[in-house]
Image (cartoon, rainbow, N blue to C red):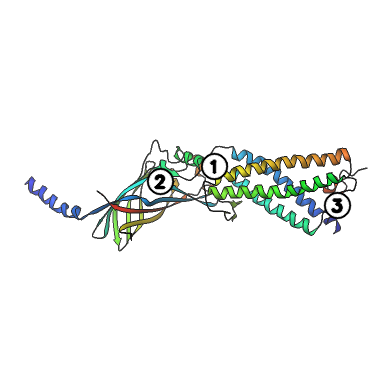
Amino acid sequence: MSRFLNSEESYGIIAQVLHWGVAALIFVQLPLGLYAANLPVSLARLRWLSYHKSLGLTILVLVLLRLVWRWIDAPPPLPGTLARRERCAARAMHRALYLVPVLATLAGWLYASAAGLSVNWFGVLLIPDLIAKNTELAPLFKVLHHVLVGLLALLLIGHIGAAARHALVLRDNVMQRILPAGWLEKK
Amino acid sequence: MMRWILLLLVCATAPASAAEDCFTSDTAGSGVTFRVMQAGAPYTGNFRRFSGVVCFSQGRLTRIDASLDPASVDTGLPELDAALKESDFFDVRKFPRVTFVSTAVQSQGAAHTTRGTLEIKGNRREVEIVLHTRPAGGKTAISGSFTLDRLQYNIGTGDWSNTKWLGAEVKLDISAILTRGK
């Protein structure tokens, strides 16, 4: 049972599955959105954007679930070998990695609502609009969505870069905490 | 003899047309809205330009002759409006008018069951629309809604004929304020 929960040394299986699940979905979601948004008005665009919106709402729920889980099961502390400055940077980065996907999804949802293009989640659940159709506000939410997604892309580059630094340069087992037990253990 | 026949014809038709009271639709307070399902969610848009003549005789609706400019489609999304004017949808350059001409009307109080010919994109079909009249600030308001199958009129051809992503049923809500006209 304990392997499912976080320990002092590592994230538990639940936190790991949520982390990698959201990571995988975001890596599908970003190119999907970019591809669909650049298609001309067509049935293909309608279909791909519909999947993009459904996937976005799925990611939103999973990120909120991760926040709840983080609150229930505290993550392992960072090693004392890291400088105070580095620990602060890590904390700020992790907060942003929860906040920005939530805001980016909400901006996308607001954009869809304002454009009058309501979402039916994978064709099985009609999702309520956040605001009534307002075609004057729609372009503003579109820009906001794009800015937040751009910010998320930068955060992901920073996050992956930091993980690579821990794994390859510092070799301090920080990255291994999110991997299944036994993977890439420091010999 | 020919004169007599002509005179009889004139006498037979004149009283009816003389008693007919015709109105045109006022732009203010009038509207044509369409609803269709997109990706499983309802979507609404409008047509901005339309006109019509509605005639009554002794409180009974006698005829309607209406037309709509499909190029005035307004969804609030310029890209979508442009696509709707192209050949997959309304093909507005070739078919600049959507028309409805009544053929028979049955009035019961304020409800008028109107049969007529609807022509969209060169496709003519007999349809029945129940219209309701009511007084509106000294004028008469007329409204009604009906549902059509867009595929019967070739609206949304090619990929767009996939009704899972773009519903076949289109509901039209029509309302107009009538002002006295020719």
Q: Quadrant of residue A152?
A: top right
Q: Amino acid at mark 3?
A: Pro
Q: Amino acid at mark 1?
A: Leu
Q: Residues within 10 Å of mark 2 (few under 14, many from 20)?
A: some
Q: Position of residue B68 (x, y in %)?
A: 37, 45
Q: Amino acid at mark 2?
A: Arg
Q: Disc 3 versus disc 1: distance between alpha carbons?
A: 49 Å
Residue beneath the point at 86% across and 46% down: A84
Residue ID for mark 3: A77
Residue ID for mark 2: B48
Q: Secondary structure at mark 2?
A: loop
- Residue B68 shown left or right of residue A91 in the figure: left
- Residue B20 shown left or right of residue B123 in the figure: left
Residue A22 vs residue A84, the one in the foreground: A84
Residue beneath the point at 49% across and 44% down: B161
Q: Position of residue A158 (x, y in %)?
A: 77, 40
- Residue furthest out toward the front: A85
Q: Position of residue A24 (x, y in %)?
A: 73, 45
Residue beneath the point at 57% across and 48% down: A112
- Residue furthest out toward the right: A187
Residue ID for mark 1: A43
Q: Position of residue B168 (x, y in %)?
A: 48, 49
Q: Are marks 3 and 1 on the same chain?
A: yes
Q: Disc 2 versus disc 3: distance between alpha carbons?
A: 62 Å
Residue B83 vs residue A156, the one in the foreground: A156
Q: Quadrant of residue A155?
A: top right
Q: Residues within 10 Å of mark 3 (few under 14, many from 20)?
A: few
Confirm whether residue A160 shows in the render. Answer: yes
Residue B100 vs residue A7, the one in the foreground: A7
